[in-house]
Image (cartoon, rainbow, N blue to C red):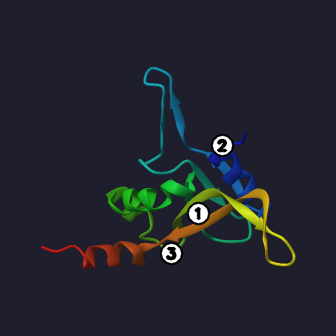
Amino acid sequence: MKSTTARTKSLFERLGYRIGLVEKWIPQTKRRLDLFGFADLIAFHPDKPEVVLIQSTSGTNHSHRREKILALDRAREWVQFETRCIAIVSFSRRVVRNKDGKKSKVKRWKERIEFITERDFAEKKSVIPF
């Protein structure tokens, strides 16, 4: 079975992006260390000016990863420039519907992509009570 990082890498490559792995494996702790505390991959498109840091996760952890990113100063600093953004990419197994609209027994991986921009950090600050 492919990891969510491998699925994300394949997805962005199909979209024309160049991908680099920025997550490290630390053997002493048997854990992975994300770049800046949230990024698994870095991507750029040869025809677009943007650079994307990507957090890859399962569908059930998507909202948790979003909250984690919005709590990090480094993530906020990353998106301060228009050419940079953060993407959260999650995968869930979903039931496929037949042509008649009925559910089948077949399940396929379905991706969800959410882009985090400077606006998301501004909205988060406005809802925090002081």
Q: Which of marks 1 and 2 is nearer the N terminus?
A: 2
| Residue mark closest to the camera, 1 vs 2 | 2
Q: Residue sitting at 63 percent across and 47 percent down?
A: 5
Q: In which quarter of the image is residue 64?
A: bottom left
Task: Decide: few, some or many residues near mark 1? Use Cα within 10 Å; few <14, some 14-19, many ≥20.
Answer: some
Q: Which of marks 1 and 3 is nearer the N terminus?
A: 1
| Residue mark closest to the camera, 3 vs 2 | 2
> Which numbered circle lies on residue 51?
1
Q: Which of 19 and 99 is in front in this view?
A: 99
> Which numbered circle lies on residue 99?
none
Q: Residue furthest top?
A: 28
Residue 116 is situated, as x and y percent measured from the top left of the image, at 48, 69
Task: Decide: few, some or many residues near mark 3? Use Cα within 10 Å; few <14, some 14-19, many ≥20.
Answer: few
Quarter of the picture containing the N terminus is: top right
Whether residue 17 sits left or right of residue 123 in the image: it is right
Residue 72 is situated, as x and y percent measured from the top left of the image, at 34, 57
Residue 8 is situated, as x and y percent measured from the top left of the image, at 67, 54
SS at mark 1?
Answer: strand
Is residue 96 placed above or below 31 in the rendered structure? below
User: Disc 2 marks which amino acid?
Assistant: Ser
Residue 59 is situated, as x and y percent measured from the top left of the image, at 56, 57
Q: Which of marks 3 and 2 is nearer the N terminus?
A: 2
Q: Residue sitting at 45 percent across and 56 percent down?
A: 65
The residue that mark 2 highlights is 3
SS at mark 3?
Answer: loop
Mark 1 in CB contact with mark 3 (< 8 angstroms): no
Kindly report the distance in space between the C-alpha atoms of the residues bearing marks 1 and 3. 10 Å
Whether residue 106 sits left or right of residue 61 in the image: it is right
Kindly report the distance in space between the C-alpha atoms of the residues bearing marks 1 and 2. 23 Å
